[in-house]
Amino acid sequence: MIPFSGLDWAVLGLFFLILLGVVVWSFMEKEKDTTDYFLAGRNAGWLVIGASIFASNIGSEHLVGLSGAGAQTGMAMAHWELQSWIIILLGWVFAPFYWSAKVYTMPEYLERRYSSSSRTFLSFISLVSYVLTKVSVTVYAGGVVLKTVLGIDSLWGIDFFWIAAMGLVLITGLYTVAGGMKAILVTSVIQTPILILGSLVILFVGMDKVGGMEELERINAERMSLMRPLDDPEFPWLGVIGGSIIIGLWYWCTDQYIVQRVLTAKGIQAARRGTIFAGYLKLLPVFIFLFPGMIAYALHEQGQINLASADQAFATLVTELLPSGIKGIVIGGLIAALMSSLASLFNSSATLFTIDFYKKYKPQSSEQHLVKVGRYATVAVVALGILWIPIMQSIADVLYEYLQLVQSLIAPGIAAVFLLGVFSRKITPAAGITGLVAGFVIGMTRLVLTIFEDSLPEGSIWLGMVDLNWLYFCSVLFIAIVLLVIGVSFFTRQASDEQVAGLTYGSISKEQRAEIKAGIDKWDIIHTVIILGITAFIYVRFW
């Protein structure tokens, strides 16, 4: 193990000095209103939008979880990272609706398309998902990484895991609460290149140490395959394709956590180009996060390192392989990812609670008061997420698999309601809320049963519900909700033409159509084709 040196601390110090400058700037640039605080005044360009989408997505679940998945299952989880095409779908298909409607949140869009109850319930689901996934996963993984890399077991009699985790929460909260979305967008531009650089260093050093790509593929053997047999107990190819697409559509095209970055755009063209830039960046994680996990597994098999657990793969490579100084850069990248992920979570949580709950019932509240309420809401969400960590550890062995498992229970209902709502004006308000409630209740029932799986009686329907592969369960639940929503729509009243005007493909106005077309040029199309081509090549290469 190579110890953390003074040079490494100096590099980290420089990183935090730059971050301090952002915090000072945030305090000086006081927000004027909720639009300024939550959506950066709707004046963001494509560069910061794309960088923010990528930095928000790439958090501890990748540094710890995706690398751990690579170490344990090889390329099986790569499907969730080969979703640049879905990010582009956000820019070409969904963003024009969201942006032209001038909404703050995704629940607000559902209110206009369906009903007020749909908005409230989606806000509730979103906040629950943040507690179950983003907060707990990010805080837990941050503590694991820093404890492993820095080699500190305890400090002042306290497990260093909790000191590191809480430290990240406090520091990130400082600049997020101070500067809102503007601070997040600026720090994303700073953090994204640091994150990519640090991860590339790990990839190249690790690949050299293991003996090159040929040796890596030899040791991982069939684990290098993206497509597993239909009888594979964990990742059957049909379940993976269906489940990953459903989760991807929910996450990239309907989740406030990601879509809020698009809503900051100064125009539809900037929104679309931001997603194209993010699409390019999203091609990297398979190679800079999942591959290092497979490298760690190969080095362990060769006897060059000792890999205690799959989720320690990335951190173990950092401690075992990197020289002084370079380690500081990589840790800077690790911390950048953790903090950008937390920052996006903080702002999205504040936006959802403030706009969709508090302001709805206290519309007379001042803009400054609403910003303050959003900050309090963020603290509550983070506290609940931390309390969930012990339960999270009991559900799945690998962090990234836990994340996708829980998201597979949340995504189907939301994705079905959004997709049907955007593409068909015949879906009724009653059908929308029915689909949301049914999908959430069934998904959470499976989650609760998973927690108490050992106490379920043999042969019961409940045990059968838990035993069904989680990817197949996700696909079946999505299909069931689609059929339910369509069925309910046959027997309930449609929304008026005035309500759905401009919110579905069948009701888009001539002005909207002209605005969308005016912002398209040949380079948008060329870059889109390039991204799709690269994605297809990766699938063919690792089929």
Image (spheres, grey):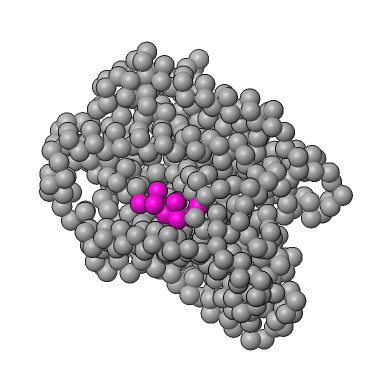
Q: Residue at x 72, y 80 (%)?
A: 497
Q: Residue at x 65, y 44 (%)?
A: 40
Looking at the picture, tell me which residue is in the foreground, 454 or 280.
280
Query: Which residue, as the protein is rendered here, is positioned at the far bottom?
Result: 490
Tell me if residue 509 is in the magenta stretch: no
Which residues are drawn in magenta?
274-283
**Is 505 placed left or right of 104 in the picture?**
left
User: Would residue 97 be visible to someone looking at this image?
Assistant: yes
State the image coordinates of residue 505 (x, y, percent, origin top left): 59, 76
Query: Which residue, as the protein is rendered here, is positioned at the far right?
Result: 364
Helix, strand or loop: magenta stretch: helix
Q: Residue at x 57, y 66 (%)?
A: 518
Q: Is residue 521 above or below residue 66?
A: below
Quarter of the figure with the C terminus: bottom left
Q: Is residue 354 above or below residue 413?
A: above
**Is 361 placed left or right of 499 in the picture?**
right
Looking at the picture, tell me which residue is in the foreground, 433 or 44.
44
State the image coordinates of residue 493 (x, y, percent, origin top left): 72, 83
State the image coordinates of residue 412 (x, y, percent, origin top left): 51, 66
Q: Residue at x 61, y 66 (%)?
A: 515
State the image coordinates of residue 376 (x, y, percent, origin top left): 71, 38
Quarter of the figure with the N terminus: top left
